[in-house]
Amino acid sequence: MDDEDLLRYSRQIMLPQIDVVGQQKLLNARVLIFGLGGLGSPVAMYLAASGVGKLVLCDPDVVDLTNLQRQLLHTSERLGEPKAVSAKKTLRAINPGIQIELRNKLCSAEELAEEVKDADVVVDATDNLESRLEINRACVQARTPLVSAAAIRWEGQISVFDLSHQESPCYHCLYGDRGEVGQTCSENGVMAPVVGILGSMQATEVVKLITGAGASLLGRLVFIDALSMQWQSVRITKSTQCTVCGTG
């Protein structure tokens, strides 16, 4: 860490839970982000600003006009551009000192497994159940911490799954294969600041996991109803019948 880094990250370094040691951990970290939309935008922007040394951005889609209401990584001038390319431009402007790798295609199962294995933390900011289950399976196999969130209409949820802890449930423990069929933003709508709130929370959980600060959302599922601005936190437990991480 040079003098410019010390100045750039000084407000974080001042926090006793971070300090110079924690900031160096962030600079040494590799975070894999799946999805560069409403959730992935604040995640990527805050992690870049916080000094996560390497961000791997995964999204096969291109920027569409309907994205711009909530996907703050992208601009009107970038319509039709791959989201990963657009995201890199924004993140470079925020922090030119970090490394950014792009994966602007659908990963095969083998490629997904390799990417997850190489990451310190994985962020699931996708918007469909199939992708979430695939990412979860790869994280369970690699024992890589997963920070997962979802949002629709005025509601959302967030949790952390980390199978390096024996007692941790996985995403499949929670939802199995039944999931949220038809529950997509394109069909149901979503309030832009809601994904901003949840994405910021995901970024916070990533920083905590990397630095060891505080207590993560491991074993807890937090819900937000922004229309009434009510929060609820519930305990979630590992399922012994889970076909992904259990004995079922």
Image (spheres, grey):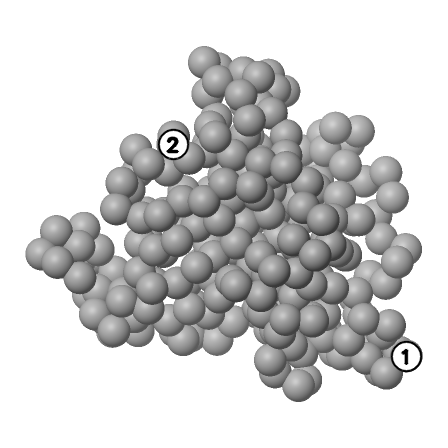
CA distance for labels 2 and 1: 44 Å
Residue under the point 70% across and 56% down:
110
Badge 1 marks a residue whose secondary structure is loop
**Residue denoted by label 2:** 90
On the rendered structure, is 17 left or right of 158?
left
Write the residue at 68% across / 84% down: 167
The percent coordinates of residue 107 (x first, y second) are 67, 46
Q: Quadrant of the N terminus?
A: bottom left
Residue 64: image location, x then y, percent: 61, 19
Question: Relative to 211, is 171 on the left or the right?
Answer: right
Q: Residue furthest left?
A: 3
In the depicted structure, whether residue 28 falls above or below residue 194: below
Q: Which residue is mark 1?
A: 248
Query: Which amino acid lies under the numbered mark 2 shown in the image of this protein?
Result: Thr
Q: Residue furthest front?
A: 110
The foreground one among 237 and 27 is 27
**In what element is the residue under mark 2?**
helix
Q: Type of residue at label 1? A: Gly
Q: Residues within 10 Å of mark 2 (few under 14, many from 20)?
A: some
The answer to whether any part of residue 69 appears in the image is: no
Q: Going from the N terminus, do you reach mark 2 or mark 1 first? A: 2
